[in-house]
Amino acid sequence: MIRNPSRRDFLKTGLAASAVLMVGTKASRANQGPQLFEKSSMGSLELPNRFIKSSTWSGTGDKKGNVTDLTLRFYNEVARGGVGLILTGNQIVMTNGMSSPYSIGNYDDSQSEGLRKLADSIHKEGCKVVAQISHSLARSNPALFIAEGDELWGVSAVPYASGSPIPKEMTRNEIARVVDAFTAAAVRSHKCGFDGVMLHGAHGYGLNQFLSPAWNRRGDSYGGSLRNRYRVVEEILEATKGALGPDFPILFKINTQDFVSGGIEPPEALKIAQRLEDNGIAAIQVSACCPISEENKHCPKDEILEKKDEGYLLDFSQYLKDSVKAPIIAVGGIRSLSTAEGALKDGKADYISMARPLIREPNLINQWKNGNTANAKCISCNGCFETGLQGLGISCKIERMLKEQQES
Ligand SMILES: Cc1cc2nc3c(=O)[nH]c(=O)nc-3n(C[C@H](O)[C@H](O)[C@H](O)COP(=O)(O)O)c2cc1C
Ligand code: SF4
């Protein structure tokens, strides 16, 4: 069982100390940083700018996880809005791996037609697309199992959260099936025209569970030391690169700190990032937290209403960027062009990603590019989940309320 710990604020100790040491180098990098609206390359992936739509479960799939017309409409609107790259919402790689209803699946070739339509419709707007692939493991919802005989699997027999069902600890054979499923999803994504894949290693999902001692209590070669906890990620990377070649872009979303008892802390996340780099990762998106993290550390964080609340994970992205050469993608509470520009200029990130602002205003990046530099209107209330849970696709609650008021 995972209990929230008393608050350990790493930022006030290790990160703050390293920030003081970095002041000199930061200053010398100012004004020389990459430009947000210029072309760039993330390994073999050429991008029209440095703005990225961060993954959002879209709540638009059918019961088996097939892409629907609603899915195509949701992504098409974002693709037209000016971001250079869309990271899709998490696509499940096995039938027992869904945590939220109406998720998109990438577990069977029968889903390829829809996935191909999705990639094509995004490309038509001049935008690139990377499929985020994931297995929720202990975070999966048994009510959403797709195939007969599906079981709740865990890295260990440790529930995702206090009160969640206890999963069955996977056998080594079952771990091999998970590795195969991730690899098959990557190969399918490539065949369907996606420009790369992102392994979801954050927010308490399956790969985060392997990496984190909070959930991983195994006594075999997949548990214990970081080397062992990282093994499954390495196996997926090796198998995928073996199948698709070394240049196929594989990105990783990392939890820099889990904010759960016994979870990953920044120094260990840095070691994971260095291993990812050694294994040829194309970019690392720097996240933290999960829905069961200690108070005020939930993901996605709410109430980002002032400049001082913005970019709540930027210190983490700087911490990894200072020691890792792989491109770093910032995420979390970026709401203004000035914060985005500052993050690049100060060497805190190479790319800027946003999720909720682009749900409320899909055209935000075009607006900024065209000189309307008003801050994002998103108030980070997380109301966008509501319509997704009804199978109607995520949408901005505030915009819906404003529309209703206008119509009444
Ligand atoms: C509705 C919704 C769905 C999300 N789904 C995913 C997901 O599928 N995969 C993922 O890595 N993050 C997911 N996130 C987290 C975002 O990618 C992002 O990390 C977080 O919202 C913070 O960024 P923001 O402040 O720009 O929204 C989701 C967030 C929201 C609001
Ligand atoms: S409901 Fe709208 S304002 Fe609230 S977090 Fe979602 S996009 Fe932002």
Image (tube, helix red, strand yellow):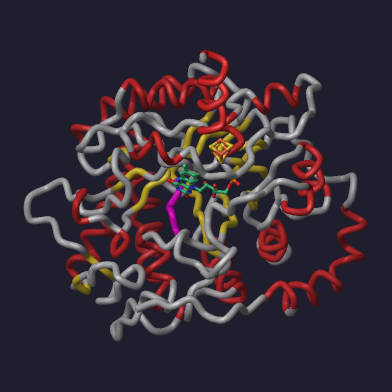
Q: In which quarter of the view is residue 326 placed?
A: bottom right
Residue closest to the far front = 408
Q: Name the residue: 51% across, 74% down.
A: 264
| Position of 275 relative to 56 (above/below) | below
Q: Which residues are magenta?
A: 198-202
Q: Name the residue: 71% across, 72% down.
A: 11
Q: Nearer the viewer, residue 168 or 280?
A: 168
Residue closest to the far top = 407
In the rendered image, residue 294, in percent from the top left (x then y), is placed at 53, 70
Q: Is residue 384 magenta?
A: no
Q: In which quarter of the view is residue 286 placed?
A: bottom right
**Is 108 left, or right, of 125 in this rendering?**
left
Q: How many marks?
A: 0
In the rendered image, residue 281, in percent from the top left (x then y), is placed at 52, 54
Q: Name the residue: 36% across, 69% down.
A: 161
Tell me which secondary structure the magenta stretch mostly adopts. strand
| Position of 407 relative to 360 (above/below) | above
Q: Name the residue: 60% across, 78% down.
A: 7
Looking at the rendered image, the quarter that the N terminus falls into is bottom left
Q: Nearer the viewer, residue 21 or 399?
A: 399
In the rendered image, residue 280, in percent from the top left (x then y), is placed at 52, 56
Q: In which quarter of the view is residue 155 placed?
A: bottom left
In the rendered image, residue 303, in percent from the top left (x then y), is placed at 64, 50
**Is 302 left, or right, of 18 in this rendering?**
left
| Position of 404 relative to 221 (above/below) | above
| Position of 325 relative to 49 (above/below) | below
Residue closest to the far left = 148
